Image: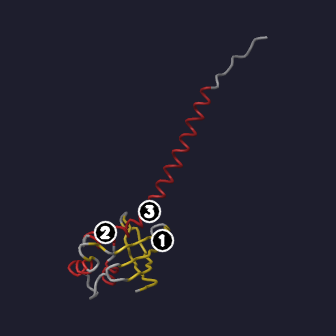
């Protein structure tokens, strides 16, 4: 009786290990992409805050719709960078920016997202809860609605 040649098991173990590593890498990549996609709407709000902090009209225009700028960042209904810079300056006292935005929730549904924030104006002693609506336009999240839902102060 002749003995059948023994098959080596180490190639199968190596192949199984490589396959497992590929599966783990794919799951990690998908989670990373989904997390980045969901975090992106929050970055639009952060950019909005930085636009006010630095009186940066170009940044404000990049992350807000024309409607939001006219309705919320203008006293005349006709947005202008000069007026925006005055509004931004009113949030600063003695060179210190006094506005805080804390994002409390975000939800993404395809090309639309919503976010809720708690906002505090330390200069003028006001607090707000704000609901943001955002749309993904040309690969960038743009704030298309801004609704103050509660106000104190």
Between marks 1 and 3 in the image, the one whose residue lies nearer the viewer: 1
Query: Are circles 2 and 1 on residues that touch, CB within 8 Å?
Result: no
Which mark is on residue 50? 2
Res. 136 image quadrant: bottom left
Q: Is residue 29 left or right of residue 101?
A: right
Of all residues shown, which one is farthest toward the front? 94
Relative image position of residue 88 (x, y in whole percent)? 27, 77
Disc 1 designates what residue? 104
Relative image position of residue 46 (x, y in whole percent)? 36, 68
| Label 3 CA crowd tier, 10 Å (few <14, some 14–19, many 20+) | some
Disc 3 designates what residue? 39
Of all residues shown, which one is farthest toward the top? 1
* Image quarter of the C terminus: bottom left
Counting labels gives 3
Q: Secondary structure at mark 2?
A: helix
Residue toward you, 77 or 152: 152
Relative image position of residue 95 (x, y in whole percent)? 24, 73
Residue toward you, 109 or 150: 150
Task: Say which residue appears at 36% left-offset and 65% top-offset.
Answer: 140
Separation of residues labelled 2 and 1 (CA atoms): 18 Å
């Amino acid at each position: 009786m002749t003995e059948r040649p023994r098959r080596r098991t180490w190639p199968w173990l190596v192949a199984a290990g490589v396959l497992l590593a590929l599966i783990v890498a794919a799951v990690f990549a998908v989670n990373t992409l989904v997390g980045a996609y969901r975090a992106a709407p929050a970055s639009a709000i952060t950019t909005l805050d930085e636009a006010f902090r630095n009186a940066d009209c170009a940044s404000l225009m990049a992350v807000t719709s024309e409607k939001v700028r006219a309705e919320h960042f203008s006293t005349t209904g006709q947005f202008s960078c000069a007026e925006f810079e005055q509004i931004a300056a009113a949030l600063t006292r003695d060179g210190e920016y006094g506005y805080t935005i804390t994002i409390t929730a975000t939800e993404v549904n395809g090309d639309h997202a919503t976010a809720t924030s708690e906002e505090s104006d330390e200069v003028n002693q006001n607090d707000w809860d704000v609901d943001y609506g955002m749309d993904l336009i040309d690969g960038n999240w743009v704030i298309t609605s801004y609704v103050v839902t509660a106000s104190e102060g």
